[in-house]
Amino acid sequence: MCDPKWVNAMEEELNFVEKNQTWELVNLPHDKKPITLKWVYKVKVKPNGEVIKHKAILVGNGFLQKLRVDYSEVYALVERI
């Protein structure tokens, strides 16, 4: 994670999140628990094995939702067109 390639990939992901206004920072209600976030790292390679790009994706652990409590809430930090 301290490798400059991964740091740049994480900064690029955060810049896209800000640019696309994917989420905004708000105060957490006193009766709610925050979901945890996790970085997922991928190395994109050409068919010959040459590295094209180091990619970092920030995802929310939405699987921690509880049945009949918070299934109506959607945690989608990454959007695809």
Image: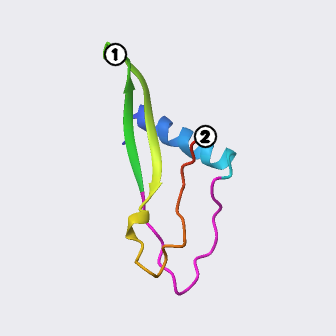
User: Can you say whether 66 is above or below 79 in the image?
Assistant: below
Residue 28 placed where, x, y %?
Answer: 58, 77
Taking depth in this image into account, of 75 and 71 the one nearest to the observer is 71
Disc on res. 71? none
Which residue is under mark 1?
47
Which residue is under mark 2?
81
Sequence-first disc among 1 and 2: 1
Mark 2 neighbour class, 10 Å CA radius: few under 14, some 14 to 19, many 20 or more:
few
Taking depth in this image into account, of 46 and 27 the one nearest to the observer is 46
Find the magenta span and give its range.
22-37
Residue 7 placed where, x, y %?
Answer: 46, 39
Q: What element carries label 1?
A: loop
Q: Is the magenta stretch mostly helix, strand or loop?
A: loop
The residue at 45%/68% (across/down) is 35
Query: Quick check: 22 left or right of 63?
Result: right
Determine the residue located farthest toward the bottom in the rendered image. Answer: 31
The residue at 41%/62% (across/down) is 61
| Three-letter amino acid code at the position of disc 1 | Pro
